[in-house]
C-alpha cells in the first residue's frame, strides 16, 4: 500500500510542477511518519523516501538508530527547549522555530555539538488560535535577531495551513508565505537564506507547489490514516 500511495503522491507532485512550470527537482517530498511503526518507515525507504518528518522528539530518538544513516530527519512539530539537546545533532532541519528563546537554546546546543543547524521560521499565516508560529509581523525582526547566531542557519519559512475541504481556500496562505520570503530575501541579511518554503500537506500540497513550495510534508497520503492511541 505504501508503495502505491507514494507513487500516486509522486505522480501528483510531477503534475503540479508541470502545471506551474517548475522542475520536479525543486520540490522535496518529506514523508511524515509520525505515529507510524518502523516497518512502515522501512517500506517507504525501500520505495525511495529519504526525508522523514516527525513532530515528537521521542519518536526521532527512537527511530533514528533503526533507520539507515542516509535518512534525513525533519523536525516539524512544536519543539520544547529542554528537548533540543536530544535532536540537535540528528536532524537535517528544524521547521518549527517560533521564538527567540527557542533559537537561543538551539544555538547553545548546536555550539556544544559543533554543528550548524538549518532551521525554518514557522509562521501562523492564517492566525489560527490553536496553532503555534509567528505572526507575519514578527518574522522579519526575529530573522534579524537569529541571523547573528553562528550555529544556526535560517534557510526559509514554514507554515501549517488551516484544515480545509477545498485546497483552493489555502492558496492565499501559500501566496502570503511566498511573498514574505521574497521580502526577506531582498534584505540580503548575512547568514540568512530564503531558499526553502515548507508548505503543503496531504490535502493541499499540489496547491502549495503551484504557489512555490520547495518542501511538502505528506503523511496520510503516503502512510494512510494515523491511529492515535490514548
Ligand atoms: C502531521 C503533519 C503533517 C502531515 O499531515 P498529513 O495531512 O497527514 O499529510 C505535515 N506537517 C505537520 C507539521 C504535521 O504535524
Image (cartoon, helix red, strand yellow):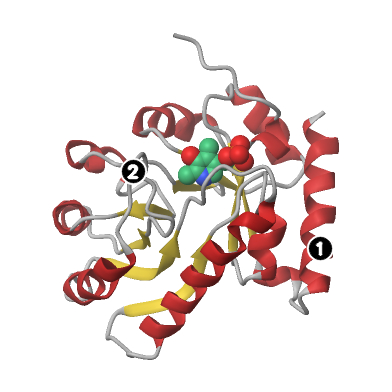
Secondary structure state at the residue bearing disc 1: helix
Q: Is residue 172 left or right of residue 74?
A: right
Q: Is residue 37 left or right of residue 7?
A: left
Ligand 1 occupies quarter:
top right
Q: Quadrant of residue 47?
A: top right
What is the x, y in percent for residue 201?
Answer: 61, 48
Q: Which of 118 and 99 lies nearest the eye of the viewer? A: 99
Q: Which residue is mark 1?
A: 14
Q: Quadrant of residue 130?
A: top left
Q: Which residue is mark 2?
A: 129
Q: Residue at x 62, y 55 (%)?
A: 169
Give the crowd class for mark 2: few <14, some 14-19, many >=20 residues within 10 Å.
few
What is the x, y in percent for residue 126?
Answer: 43, 56
Image position of 207 with respect to 139: above or below: above
Q: Quadrant of residue 224?
A: top right
Mark nearest the camera among 2 and 1 is 2
Q: Is mark 2 within 8 Å of ligand 1?
A: no
Amino acid at each position: 500500500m505504501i508503495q502505491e500511495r507514494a507513487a500516486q503522491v509522486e505522480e501528483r507532485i510531477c503534475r503540479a510542477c508541470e502545471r506551474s512550470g517548475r522542475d520536479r527537482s525543486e520540490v522535496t517530498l518529506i514523508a511524515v511518519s509520525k505515529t507510524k511503526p518502523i516497518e512502515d518507515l522501512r517500506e517507504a525507504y525501500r520505495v525511495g523516501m529519504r526525508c522523514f518528518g516527525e513532530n515528537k522528539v521521542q519518536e526521532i530518538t527512537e527511530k533514528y538508530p533503526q533507520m539507515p544513516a542516509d535518512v534525513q530527519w525533519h523536525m516539524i512539530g512544536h519543539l520544547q527547549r529542554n528537548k533540543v539537546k536530544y535532536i540537535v545533532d540528528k536532524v537535517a532541519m528544524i521547521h518549527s522555530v517560533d521564538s527567540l528563546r527557542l533559537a537561543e537554546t538551539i544555538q547553545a546546543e548546536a555550539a556544544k555539538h559543533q554543528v550548524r543547524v538549518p532551521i525554518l521560521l514557522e509562521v501562523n499565516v492564517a492566525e489560527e488560535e490553536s496553532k503555534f508560529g509567528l505572526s507575519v509581523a514578527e518574522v522579519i525582526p526575529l530573522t534579524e535577531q537569529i541571523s547573528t547566531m553562528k550555529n544556526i542557519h535560517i534557510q526559509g519559512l514554514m507554515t501549517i495551513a488551516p484544515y480545509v475541504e477545498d485546497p483552493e481556500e489555502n492558496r492565499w496562505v501559500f501566496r502570503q508565505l511566498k511573498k514574505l520570503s521574497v521580502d526577506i530575501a531582498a534584505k540580503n541579511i548575512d547568514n540568512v537564506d530564503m531558499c526553502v518554503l515548507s508548505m503543503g500537506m496531504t490535502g493541499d500540497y499540489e496547491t502549495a507547489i503551484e504557489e512555490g513550495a520547495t518542501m511538502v510534508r505528506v503523511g496520510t497520503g503516503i502512510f494512510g490514516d494515523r491511529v492515535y492511541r490514548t
